[in-house]
Amino acid sequence: MASTPLASFTILSLLLHVATSCVSAQSYEAFRQCFLDRTIRDSSRIHSPDTPSFYSIHNATIRNSRFASTSGATKPAFIVTPGATLDVQAAVTCGKANGLHLRVRSGGHDYEARSSYSNGDPFVILDLTDFRSIAVDAAEGTAWVGAGATVSELYYNINTQTKNDTLAFTGSLCASVGIGGFIGGGGLSALGRKYGAAADNIVDATIVDVNGRHLDRKAMGEDLFWAIRGGSSASFGVVLAYKVQLVSVPPSVTVFRVNRTLGQGLSKLVEKWQTVSHDSSGDLFIRILANAVGAGANRTILATFEGMFLGGHDDFLSVLQNSYPELGVEAKDLTEMKWIESTLFFAGYPTTDKTLLLDRRPYKNRTFKGKSDFAREPISVEAWDKIWKYLLDAEDEVLQIILSPWGGKFDEIAEDALPFPHRKGNLINLQYFLFWPDSPDEVNQKHLDWMRGFYDFMAPYVSSNPRATYFNVKDLDLGTNKLGNTTYSDATVWGKTYFQGNFERLARVKARVDPESYFWNEQSIPPFSA
Ligand SMILES: Cc1cc2nc3c(=O)[nH]c(=O)nc-3n(C[C@H](O)[C@H](O)[C@H](O)COP(=O)(O)OP(=O)(O)OC[C@H]3O[C@@H](n4cnc5c(N)ncnc54)[C@H](O)[C@@H]3O)c2cc1C
Ligand SMILES: *[C@@H]1O[C@H](CO)[C@@H](O)[C@H](O)[C@H]1NC(C)=O
Ligand SMILES: *[C@@H]1O[C@H](CO)[C@@H](O)[C@H](O)[C@H]1NC(C)=O
Ligand SMILES: *[C@@H]1O[C@H](CO)[C@@H](O)[C@H](O)[C@H]1NC(C)=O
Ligand SMILES: *[C@@H]1O[C@H](CO)[C@@H](O)[C@H](O)[C@H]1NC(C)=O
Ligand SMILES: *[C@@H]1O[C@H](CO)[C@@H](O)[C@H](O)[C@H]1NC(C)=O
Ligand SMILES: *[C@@H]1O[C@H](CO)[C@@H](O)[C@H](O)[C@H]1NC(C)=O
């Protein structure tokens, strides 16, 4: 291949770039040539650090900005934005041939930004921003959705393509989460108690595997199809699209949002909520978001109770008055609306403008750390008092605790039906979300240490042996694969925390479909074939 002045320039800047990440410039250039040779030679699909667009594309969907100032967080060598299946196949084949791992990015919401950074492993981002087509089949009650679409783009399309207010999707409460990671890790929504996880509502999928083959459910086989519904899509290939089973909701639903503080007997309210929210019918969803606010004599815990009922205003009021009168929700607190409007309500938008659902970047980019737990036994009033005190005492830490109800449909699905294992026996789900302004490394470290201390403090109140964590609240503190190597035994602690008894089967599927662990990241499933 003749070396044009442009190509020499590219190689020079690549040399400068890779000097820090210890990978030869040749392998990057070889990847680029291989990719162009196997596709329609559209070089606008590859973005390297010497193109001005590289950094803004890299940043575009990163939701956790912590890694911009984390030492050792490695940026991609290239970003590929495929326009066709052929491009994805070429990226896999050329990445493998040149010793460059791929990290697939759909919505970029990974809690540890593993779709945008690595811990030293040289890699290429395959950003599915152009894999967003959505085709809804109203008669069948299904939709094919490109992995790069957001959950709210799907909500919008269900609404506009079917003009039927009773068809819905079990999508996240935050509007801009990507389909690829959300379903690949399970998928929790306000409809979860009625219909289970998003992964429970998938009927087909297409994937490009490690050999560059484009496979649907039938061709990939039931084991691999099982694994990519909650077992970490990133470990098994590139999911191009999922076929979603839509669920049915009434023509109108009813929502509320009320605030309560310590002075209103918060610990007793939360203690009661644990059993009420778990034992009620799947039509009811009430979650709590709590954090410390104020200073001095005004310091308290502010808890926002948010709820949705799959039914009308008056029915919801009587359900609340019968089962949970302590919360004190009144008729004026309840608003009846269409389900599509409730997705705007939970996302914190005005419910009048559906087009906001098409905004892919609505959320603040903030530096954060998340962790999650499940509780199988009710947490006592005294324990809640202690938990609030922990938050009140930590004046430099803004921790939000998000409490989500369990039970309902989750109780009816077997623990091994899908990799997502959090089923019968769990009472509530807890999520801890600590955020702080973008800061230098040592400040980040101080907050991360505090968060680890809080997680240890919570241990007596939550499930154990193994402690249970939702995979989509990814937490690298639980353990990581070693760079360039992945062993099953090293991974079992974090693997069982996320997947419980399903971890071994995931590792066996991995051994069958990707024995060399080409699809590798700090918490990819290791192969196990003993
Ligand atoms: C603000 C916020 C709110 C959230 N709210 C909810 C919620 O209400 N309910 C809930 O369940 N979760 C929620 N999450 C968690 C969310 O489900 C996970 O972070 C999820 O993995 C994000 O998917 P993504 O495609 O946006 O992320 P990405 O960062 O693109 O991907 C996440 C992981 O999946 C891999 N991956 C992504 N797409 C593919 C693909 N097509 N093929 C193979 N691997 C792929 C990536 O490589 C990465 O490892 C929230 C997260 C944030 C930041
Ligand atoms: C990318 O994000 C980081 C962290 O928020 C910021 O410091 C940097 O300026 C951004 N770069 C671009 C090109 O947007
Ligand atoms: C809307 O979808 C539901 C299925 O949830 C179906 O029963 C109903 O007939 C549809 N209504 C219209 C007007 O198409
Ligand atoms: C609840 O508290 C939040 C945070 O302070 C505030 O923005 C909101 O307006 C409050 N809601 C009500 C109904 O008081
Ligand atoms: C508490 O709040 C009141 C009313 O907002 C305010 O006047 C007072 O200064 C606050 N006290 C402290 C200690 O912050
Ligand atoms: C997040 O960062 C991206 C890239 O820098 C930017 O385009 C987007 O507007 C930011 N979002 C917010 C809410 O700040
Ligand atoms: C990976 O780790 C295992 C166990 O520690 C070791 O036997 C093997 O040689 C390692 N492989 C590589 C490529 O480092």
Image (tube, grey):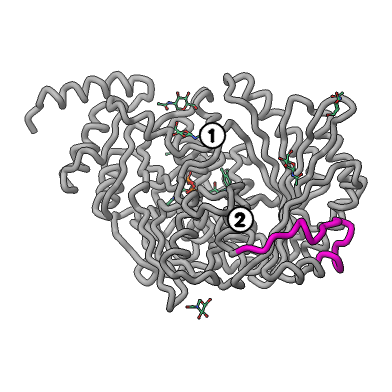
Which quarter of the figure has residue 424? bottom right
**Element type where label 2 sits in the image:** helix
Q: Is residue 172 above or below residue 138?
A: above
Which residue is rendered at x = 40% and y = 65% of the image? Answer: 144
In this rendered view, identify the residue nearer to me: 513 or 420: 420
Question: What range of the chain is rendered magenta?
Answer: 320-337
In this rendered view, identify the residue nearer to me: 409 or 495: 409
Residue 429 visible in the picture: yes
Q: Quadrant of ligand 4?
A: top right
Q: Which residue is mark 2?
A: 499
| Side of 395 where 351 appears, left or right | left
Residue situated furthest left in the rendering: 2
The three-letter amino acid code for the residue at tag 2 is Phe
Which residue is rendered at x = 37% and y = 36% of the image? Answer: 123
Q: Nearer the viewer, mark 2 or mark 1?
A: 1
Position of the N terminus, as image quadrant, is top left
**Res. 365 mark:** 1
Q: Is mark 1 within 8 Å of ligand 6?
A: yes
Which quarter of the figure has residue 334? bottom right
The three-letter amino acid code for the residue at tag 1 is Asn
Which residue is rendered at x = 26% and y = 38% of the image? Answer: 46
Which quarter of the figure has residue 453? top right
